[in-house]
Image (cartoon, rainbow, N blue to C red):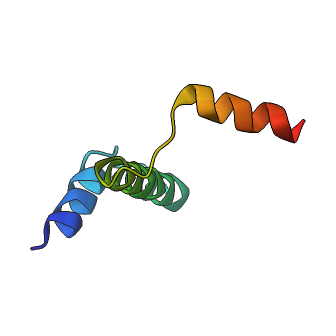
Amino acid sequence: MSPLKQEAMNTINDLPDDADMEEIMYRLYVLDKIRKGQEAAQQGRTISSDKLKQEIEQQW
């Protein structure tokens, strides 16, 4: 089993038995966003919090 599939299965298995489809989808969505963020950080595709603040201030 691929590591990604195993991680998704573990996430689902950790949910309570009465979890509904919305909760399952939300947890998988969060898992996906965390993985993508980790990949971006490893590839250096991040900006500092100061740079982010500057960009937000420029928009307003």
Q: Residue furthest top?
A: 50
Up-down relation of residue 60 to residue 2 (above or below): above
> In the figure, 50 relative to 35: above or below?
above
Q: Residue at x 71, y 31 (%)?
A: 54
Q: Quadrant of the N terminus?
A: bottom left
Name the residue furthest bottom.
Answer: 1
Residue 33: percent from the left, percent from the top? Answer: 45, 53
Q: Nearer the viewer, residue 46 or 36?
A: 46
Give the residue displayed 22% in from the left and 69% down from the top. 5
Residue 33 as seen in the image, left or right of residue 22: left
Q: Nearer the viewer, residue 21 or 51?
A: 51
Residue 49 sits in quarter: top right
Q: Please, which residue is most extreme toward the left here?
A: 1
Which residue shows up at 85% across the image and 41% down it? 59
User: Vertical placement of 30 versus 52: above or below?
Assistant: below
Left or right of 50, for residue 39: left
In this rendering, position of residue 28 left or right of residue 54: left
**Quadrant assignment, res 60:** top right
Q: Residue at x 68, y 29 (%)?
A: 53
Question: Residue 29, percent across and down?
Answer: 47, 57
Tell me how many marks there are. 0
Image location of residue 47, percent across then percent down: 51, 40
